[in-house]
Image (cartoon, helix red, strand yellow):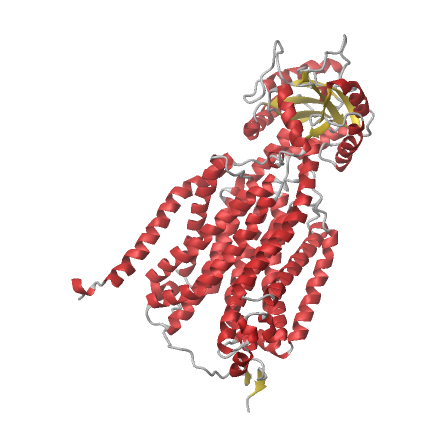
């Protein structure tokens, strides 16, 4: 029995420290967990919110607020009849318009007007009518559109069908598609990781410890992100919210896998679980911290982006990585120490002492650096030792062939109606509107011009190909966007346009759908020709917002890529104390990214038949793949350097590959599975990011980290550490046989 004197300070510390750390994380999870369901309340999913203030369409939005004093977003209600609609029946449809205007959240009428709803507006072919319903607050668009759809369904005349579409309808369907991001996404990701951990560890306890570490990190990260978004410090979108969950679960699990691998290895050499966790932590913290720092700094490079959606993702994701690091380096060690060998039950690692220096293998081959390494990684190491140049050349050719498909990537943006991959009432309604009306009705082009040039600018707008109608904004209840051949001409003199600060506003209806390629070309034509009449003219609207978003995303891609590569290169040089090795790693992950993008382009076009890709997809794919790809190379090369100091460069490369192969491959599979879980959210952008990153991580894990990098480094030899002391110290290599001794020889 232990007496009071047996409880030394060290023994007390072993009890108190884990308890304190675990309690702190429990508090963080307890406070942060409930905020998970609140993230959607501080999320914004509209394109306009993420444009820079300098964008032309953003300036037009600012002017529009001066003219209308409203943030209304239009919904288009379109009703199609099986037969022609006689004029005498329009009164029946007018009753529907009144009921639509009575829905809570629809903008209230101004002055003596009975309703703010424009319509019914009959089509030229007489088989459809439409209503323009202004929704007062874009924050409530989901609820209001749902109520509008209920009203339409309950009040349709016999023989007709109705849809709620337009900007409000499309936004509502997009918000609904993000609905599973709070629960389904996390459930699928955690479930996938749990199954993989069971297969990797063959333990019933350890997967729970690792998942607790990941989930607690996510809870803490969500709390901070929620508060930052609530205070207005960052802009949170549905896509950032989904990526945050996936990134934290994947990264925290990856870091945990590396620590667990070191812990298991230490338990074989050290009897005390406390000494073992200390030894494992000292060996693992540097590569884990370096890996996390690399990802954090790469993500923070997104702050240089002009597109606010890109800029906001940087700190949001970086916060997630910070808590992934903290949980893996604080919470998990305490959990492992508390459970000891029982964490690996039923296959507990046994204490065997220090590993013998020599091992015999069934193949009868002695390869310096592969002593004690068996199975797949011995075979891979043997291949690299015998044919290093052939190995990396074949891997290089394979990646280059995959990268050739990158020319087929169509990342110029997609129509808003294509963003939701499941059935969308709004997308279906857009097709009906395009069939019977000017397809751009309800989403006008907005032109702000000087009052002195108003007539010349209006004439130029009306004369532009792709413009159906155009008129001055007069404050009339019925928007100018719906005037024209689809409704009776107004009698009497036209009202004077509203003037604000010497400017007038022109509403122009597009002949094509507002999110179509033809509409974008029309807006570009307006921006090119109108400044000849009024150099200060501004062109905005829904179509212009899409154009500015895509153009800004393309600019961000060209700007961010060099910055990210430079930051990662500096980190690798400091970590590996070399120039050549970091250059090799950077080149390998860039090639891996290009290969992943090339294969993804072919799959998107020929398998999934996607209409295209968001312009931000290549940038997000680059940041995640390059940062996370370097992660695995950091895990590998820090161990290689450690072994090279002990046994020489070439044996150290084989040794480092052999002892890290399983854990890094497992980490790659985990990260690929977590990103693949993004595919359960039926949003085109997230589905594409899911495939690019999941496939790219697997490609990087299997080809780049397992074959290309170690084979190329082995072929280069000691020079891989140039110009560090490890490269200069030739006698260091000779003493260990790293350069002189043939590494693959038969035993006599």
Q: Does residue 202 appear anywhere in the picture?
A: no
Quadrant including the N terminus:
bottom left
Q: Residue 639, relative to residue 608: is it above or below?
A: below
Image location of residue 349, percent across then percent down:
39, 70
Residue in front for this viewpoint, 207 or 446: 446
What is the count of numbered marks?
0
The x and y percentages for residue 504 are 71, 19
Viewer-nearest residue: 71 or 113 = 71
Whether residue 735 sits left or right of residue 348 in the image: it is right
Q: Which residue is painted at 45% across and 38% down in the image?
A: 227
Q: Is residue 125 above or below residue 55?
A: above
Query: In this rendering, would 650 be left or right of 118?
Result: left
Residue 433 visible to the viewer: yes
Q: Is residue 605 above or below residue 492?
A: below
> At 61% across and 10% down in the image, what residue appears?
111
**Quarter of the image where the C terminus is located:** bottom right
Most distant residue in the top direction = 492
Q: Position of residue 225 (x, y in %)?
A: 48, 42
- The residue positioned farthest toward the bottom in the image shown: 748
The x, y position of residue 71, in whole percent, is 59, 24
Residue 479, located in which quarter of the rendered image? top right
Q: Quadrant of residue 497?
A: top right
Q: Report which quarter residue 502 is drawn in.
A: top right
- Relative side of 78 to 486, left or right: left
């Amino acid at each position: 029995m232990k007496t009071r004197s047996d409880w030394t300070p060290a023994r007390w510390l072993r009890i108190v420290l884990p308890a304190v750390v675990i309690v702190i994380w429990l508090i963080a999870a307890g406070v942060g967990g409930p905020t998970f369901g609140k993230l959607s309340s501080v999320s914004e999913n509209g394109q306009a919110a993420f444009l820079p203030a300098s964008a032309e369409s953003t300036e037009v939005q600012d002017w529009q607020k001066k003219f209308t004093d409203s943030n209304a977003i239009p919904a288009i209600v379109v009703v199609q009849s099986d037969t022609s609609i006689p004029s005498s029946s329009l009164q029946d449809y007018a009753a529907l318009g009144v009921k639509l205007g009575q829905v809570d959240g629809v903008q209230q009428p101004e002055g003596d007007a009975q309703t703010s709803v424009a319509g019914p507006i009959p089509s030229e072919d007489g088989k459809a009518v439409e209503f323009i319903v202004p929704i007062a607050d874009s924050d409530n668009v989901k609820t209001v559109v749902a109520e509008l759809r209920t009203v339409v369904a309950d009040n349709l005349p016999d023989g007709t069908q109705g849809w709620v579409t337009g900007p409000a309808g499309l936004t509502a369907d997009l918000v609904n598609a993000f609905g599973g991001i709070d629960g389904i996404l996390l459930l699928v990701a955690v479930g996938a990781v749990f199954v993989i951990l069971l297969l990797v560890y063959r333990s019933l306890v350890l997967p729970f410890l690792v998942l607790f570490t990941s989930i607690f990190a996510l809870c803490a990260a969500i709390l901070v992100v929620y508060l930052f978004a609530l205070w207005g410090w960052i802009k949170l979108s549905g896509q950032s919210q989904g990526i945050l969950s996936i990134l934290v679960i994947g990264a925290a699990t990856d870091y945990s896998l590396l620590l667990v691998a070191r812990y298991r290895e230490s338990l074989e050499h050290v009897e005390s679980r406390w000494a073992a966790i200390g030894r494992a932590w000292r060996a693992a913290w540097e590569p884990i911290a370096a890996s996390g720092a690399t990802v954090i700094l790469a993500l923070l490079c997104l702050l240089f982006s002009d597109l606010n959606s890109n800029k906001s993702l940087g700190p949001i994701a970086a916060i997630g990585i910070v808590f992934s690091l903290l949980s893996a380096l604080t919470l998990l060690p305490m959990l492992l120490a508390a459970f000891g060998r029982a964490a690996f039950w039923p296959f507990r690692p046994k204490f065997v002492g220090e590993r013998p220096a020599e091992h015999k293998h069934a193949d009868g081959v002695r390869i310096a650096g592969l002593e004690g390494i068996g199975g797949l990684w011995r075979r891979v190491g043997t291949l690299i030792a015998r044919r290093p140049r052939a190995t990396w050349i074949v891997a290089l050719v394979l990646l280059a062939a995959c990268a050739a498909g990158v020319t087929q990537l169509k990342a110029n943006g997609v129509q808003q109606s294509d963003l939701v991959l499941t059935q969308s009432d709004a997308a279906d309604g857009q097709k009906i509107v395009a069939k019977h009306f000017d397809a751009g009705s309800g989403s006008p082009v907005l032109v702000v011009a000087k009052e002195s040039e108003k007539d010349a600018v209006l004439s130029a707008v009306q004369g532009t190909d792709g413009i159906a109608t155009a008129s001055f904004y007069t404050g009339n209840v019925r928007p100018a966007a719906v005037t024209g051949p689809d409704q009776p001409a107004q009698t009497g003199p036209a009202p004077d346009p509203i003037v604000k600060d010497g400017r007038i506003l022109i509403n122009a209806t597009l002949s094509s759908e507002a999110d179509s390629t033809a509409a974008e070309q029309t807006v570009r034509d307006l921006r090119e020709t109108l400044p000849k009449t009024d150099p200060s003219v501004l062109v905005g609207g829904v179509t212009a917002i899409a154009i500015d978003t895509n153009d800004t995303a393309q600019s961000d891609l060209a700007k961010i890529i060099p910055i990210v590569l430079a930051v990662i290169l500096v980190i690798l040089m400091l970590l590996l104390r070399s120039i050549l090795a970091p250059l090799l790693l950077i080149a390998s992950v860039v090639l891996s990214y290009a290969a992943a993008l090339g294969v993804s382009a072919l799959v998107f076009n020929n398998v999934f038949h996607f209409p295209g890709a968001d312009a931000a997809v290549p940038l997000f794919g680059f940041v995640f793949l390059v940062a996370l790809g370097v992660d695995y190379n950091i895990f590998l090369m820090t161990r290689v350097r450690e072994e090279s100091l002990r046994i020489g460069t070439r044996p150290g490369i084989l040794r480092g590959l052999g002892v890290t192969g399983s854990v890094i491959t497992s980490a790659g599979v985990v990260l690929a599975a977590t990103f693949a879980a993004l595919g359960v959210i039926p949003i085109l952008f997230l589905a594409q990011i899911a495939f690019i990153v999941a496939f790219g991580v697997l490609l990087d894990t299997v080809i780049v980290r397992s074959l290309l990098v170690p084979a190329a480094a082995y072929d280069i030899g000691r020079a891989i550490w140039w110009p560090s002391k490890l490269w200069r110290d030739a006698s260091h290599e000779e003493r260990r046989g790293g350069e002189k001794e043939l590494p693959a020889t038969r035993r006599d």
